[in-house]
Amino acid sequence: MPLTTVTNPVKAGSRYLSGNDAAAEGAIAAGCRYYGGYPITPSSEIMEYMSRELVPRGGAFMQMEDEIASISSVVGASWSGAKAMTATSGPGLSLMQECLGYAAFTETPVVLVDVQRAGPCTGQATKVGAGDIMAVKWGSHGDYQVVALSPWSVQEMFSLTVEAFNLAERLRVPAFLLAEEATGHLRERVDLPETLEIYDRDYVPKQPPFGCDEADGIPSMPGFGMGENLLVTGSTHDQWGFRKTEGPAFHDSLVRRLSQKVLSRKAEICRHEGYYLDDAELVVVAYGFTARAALRAVRQARQEGLAVGLLRLITIWPFDDELITRVAQGAKGFLVPEMNLGQVDGLVRSAAGDTSVKSLTQVNGSTISPASIMTALKEMR
Amino acid sequence: MARSMEKYLRPEVQTTPFCPGCGHGVLMGSLLRAIDQLELDMSKTLFVSGIGCAAWIPSPNFAADTLHTLHGRAVAFATGAKAANPKLKVIVISGDGDLASIGGNHLIHAARRNLELTVICANNMIYGMTGGQMAPTTPQGHLTATSVTGNPYRPFDLVKLVKGAGAPYVARGAVTRPYELIGYLKKAIASPDFAFVDVLSPCPTQYGRRNKLDSAGAMYERLRGLCQSEAQGACAPEGAEDTLQLGEFND
């Protein structure tokens, strides 16, 4: 079985770490053996950590000339057999978009950590934002799917990085740790486990690397230097990688399978946490750092006798709209606080049915306070 | 191509993708002969290319691992592949627009970094696949689809560019002089450093017809004649103010 339990290679037990350092340790723990990156605030600490730790562990580190080169090198390294990653922030993410599509189309397992800052453009480089929700999913042209996980703690900067690697390798997709500056630079206690569940890529020799019979299948993932004579191309291709830039059926079946292999597994991929949902009339739907403030506000509201709950989204992409629809059946209203102008709000609205949805947006480079959420909840009563 | 080189080609490939008169087939044959003479293990060799006519030299033709990447990014992909598996011999082969325009930054930084990569530029001085637009290597004054009154700008001399960026081995060959070209390619592939070979390769379809070079044969004769003067030091495409010298350019 590709999923195996291994001894955690980084120091286990209680530690005091920053979110960015915890993400880097999570990558090492997941078996990352290649990092290609370019400095950018507020993610650079991840790159600095990897520059120190990867080579002594038998991996390779390259500081590339720009973010386009970073992700290109990561895709090349992944095909050379290494679990591979990069980390960046908004402007770098924008530069990576073409190659993100290449990774999706060639079914290359790669992990990207996006430590979000206040955008658009250069924006406020040292300030927090959550404006990349749509960019990680829709930024490259054409139809494709990615996985994106949203950590709310330093603990999850570690554990969700491990999970991002596991999902990238299992699904052969780009997987994002969709973090925020506030979590990347947060320092708090983490408890790192003695052992970890690690997924290593499935490889069956001499199997077609780009296709299988099932409409949502995930093919075997070989690598360079294994005698497979691989043909990897970003053009439309058949199951062996031969370019098929004319036949409509090749393109149709490939594009549909690349989406279906993710969407048909939503039940396995998507994770969330619920707080006080059983009798909640108003439900805060929050993710990332904002969910910390939301939980504080919800607890305070409960003390004041309000029937309020929290639905914390851990998986952002693929978006679990069935979950929203399910929770909506018992709720009168949703409140969606976000450090953007309502990116997840739109997704919640499309799945909420008759349940009303209120958007609480804040794009001033600061985290949303529990008081703001409390005020919005009281306005909804 | 001689049948003795067929062992390096995929059996599924039956036709050439190149236009009549294109020089890239000669470059392809020269590269395979260099590989043959070096007795390179193709199962441990990775060919990386970008987008454009030259990117089709290895992909899908070569019976080896091939990585057909994005436009301009071949050298960056190759850097990651080599770093993650240093046992691979990694050979990049792509065009002048791909390597020197959209991919120019990756080219000079790879030369600076001096990771062991062989980069071969199939230089036809034009964008062939997209319909004959001006390239960063188009000689000044020459006609293209985007310079109908003549290219107003100076071209890159890729040998000087890459050498200036620090590449330890730099050479320029031409498909009209295949024996020298094979020698350059062998040295570049065998090099433990970053090695670059600029290869002049005529494009009759897009370049020749726009510049009133009557036939593919005429283009080859012209290139051959120009290159013969290399013995005296210079190989100058007609109309070029700068001269392009053939040979090896190493300290």
Image (cartoon, coloured by chain):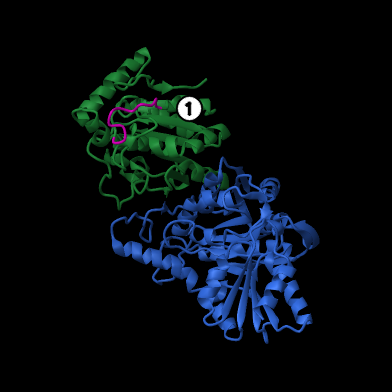
Chain colours: A blue, B green
Which quadrant holds the C terminus of chain A?
Answer: bottom right
The part of the chain drawn in magenta is B145-155
Q: Position of residue A100 (x, y in %)?
A: 50, 55
Horizontal side of residue A301 vs B174, given as left or right: right
Q: Inspect the magenta stretch and tell me whether residue B151 lies in it.
A: yes
The mark total stands at 1
Nearer-the-camera pick, B144 or B99: B144
Where is mark 1, residue-wise?
A: B161
Position above or below: A332 against B160: below
**Which SS class for mark 1?**
helix
- Tell me the chain of label 1: B
Position above or below: B218 against A348: above
Kindly indicate the quadrant of the structure image that contains residue B216: top left
Q: Inspect the magenta stretch and tell me whether residue A24 lies in it.
A: no
Label 1 neighbour load within 10 Å: few <14, some 14-19, many 20+:
some
Q: Position of residue B135 (x, y in %)?
A: 36, 34
Nearer-the-camera pick, B57 or B97: B97
Q: Position of residue A14 (x, y in %)?
A: 81, 63
Nearer-the-camera pick, A48 or A205: A48
- Seen as rendered, the residue at the extreme front is A379
Residue B39 appears in the rendering: no
Residue B93 appears in the rendering: yes
Magenta portion: prevailing SS class: loop
Q: Amino acid at mark 1?
A: Leu
Q: Position of residue B146 (x, y in %)?
A: 31, 35
Nearer-the-camera pick, B24 or A236: A236
